[in-house]
Image: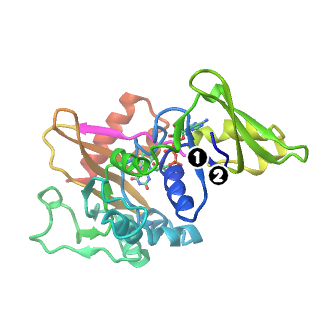
Amino acid sequence: MPNVDVIIFGGGIAGLWTMHEASRRGYRCLLLEAFVLGSGQTVASQGIIHGGLKYTLQGMMTGSARRIREMPSIWRKSLAGEQLPDLSQTEIRSNNCYLWRTESLSSRLGMFGAKMGLQVVPKNLTPDEVPDLLSGCPGSIGQMDEQVISPYSLIQNLADAFPDQIFQYDPKSLKFIHDPSGKLTAVQIQAPDGTPTTIQTAAVLLTAGSGNETLLKLAHPDSTVQQQNRMQKRPLHMALVRGTLPPFNGHCVDGAKTRVTITSDIDCQGRTVWQIGGQVAETGVTMNRRELIEHAVRELSASIP
Ligand SMILES: Cc1cc2nc3c(=O)[nH]c(=O)nc-3n(C[C@H](O)[C@H](O)[C@H](O)COP(=O)(O)OP(=O)(O)OC[C@H]3O[C@@H](n4cnc5c(N)ncnc54)[C@H](O)[C@@H]3O)c2cc1C
């Protein structure tokens, strides 16, 4: 294998997007994936190109929250093939998301905050434009400039550009090699025939999601480095609804939270499936399967009269 400028560990959205960006700037990149591309969070996600609604609701206008506000327009151009990375082969499930609220006061305040903080103010729908599903909801119904994509097709689209630079490897075979000063200079993995292969690299980038912790320990057994690089873990458990459902994508705002976020996909039998995220998925982490389903049913009944 050739020597490279950057070895990227992990082929979810972070690793693949970075690979495109780094390659465009002339860096020779290699991506090493331990399992299946995107198999951590990316393929399991709802696929919404967020404009920062959640941070807006929580009044968190931090630097990163401000940058998220720009994401819908950046992605829209890539998805249209008008800027790199070219994502024109990615399936767009919806071009926008609905925004509505429940009857509570906190819900009204949340909706007001959302309209004030977002880069592109949600469009208020006329009664004719409101989907049947939300016809019984209080207040005005908004439509936001957030596209919903198929994460699986996104991963395919991004990976297709690098057929010879993405490799699956056995993480058990991995060794990081340092020079006498302690600088990481190479990576050793096992080739498919079992022989160890060493790749010299100027930089290593960890974009392996929940796999980063193990990789960091292996790269820097020194515990101080690990403490300085604590990773944020944010598990989510969505509920899925299957039945005779209209395709639908949107957020129900309640106070400083998105009480439910619904996205739609099609299952292998061609049926619409709703993915129930938002606060339901955050709370769902502490619940078993049955509790989560019951909770999701209650939250859906409260959100959609
Ligand atoms: C239920 C759910 C819904 C979500 N909905 C949305 C949404 O609608 N919009 C949004 O913007 N975000 C959403 N998110 C968050 C979003 O999915 C994540 O922020 C994003 O996918 C993280 O991407 P990543 O590339 O950092 O990690 P991951 O997607 O987890 O990718 C990590 C990759 O590294 C690989 N890997 C693991 N260990 C190793 C190793 N040792 N060596 C090499 N490779 C390794 C994994 O196999 C995987 O391919 C959602 C998340 C969840 C869980």
Mark linked to residue 30: 1
Q: Name the side, left or right, on which 104 lies relative to 267.
A: right
Q: Which amino acid does label 1 sit on?
A: Leu
**Of 158 and 283, which appears nearest the observer?**
158
Q: Which of 295 and 168 is in front in this view?
A: 168
Disc 2 residue type?
A: Val
In the rendered structure, does residue 86 fall within the stretch colored magenta? no
Magenta span covers which residues? 233-241
266 over 132 or under it: above or below: above
- Residue at position x 15%, y 44% from top? 245
**Callout 1: helix, strand or loop?**
strand
Residue at the limit of the structure toward the left, as seen here: 128
Q: Is residue 158 above or below residue 9?
A: below
Query: Which residue in the structure is indicated by mark 2?
Result: 6
Is residue 239 located in the magenta-colored stretch of the structure?
yes
> Horizontal and vertical percent for residue 33?
54, 38
Q: Position of residue 142 (x, y in %)?
A: 26, 70
In the rendered structure, find residue 104 and report the number of the disc placed on it.
none
Q: Do the residues labelled 1 and 2 touch (CB within 8 Å)?
A: yes
Direction from residue 55 to residue 276 in the image, left or right: left
- Residue at 35%, 61% (x, y): give it: 253
- Which residue does the image show at 41% across and 69% down from the upper left? 74
Q: Which residue is drawn at 26% across and 75% down?
A: 123
Estimate the spatial distance between the alpha carbons at disc 1 and disc 2, rounded to whole Å: 6 Å
Q: From the viewer's perspective, is 130 left or right of 65?
A: left
Residue 1 in the image, given as x and y percentages of width and height: 62, 39
Question: Percent x, y for residue 171?
Answer: 62, 30
Badge 2, how many Cα within 10 Å: few under 14, some, many 20+?
many
The crowding category of the residue bearing disc 1, from other C-alpha atoms within 10 Å (few below 14, some 14 to 19, many at least 20), is many
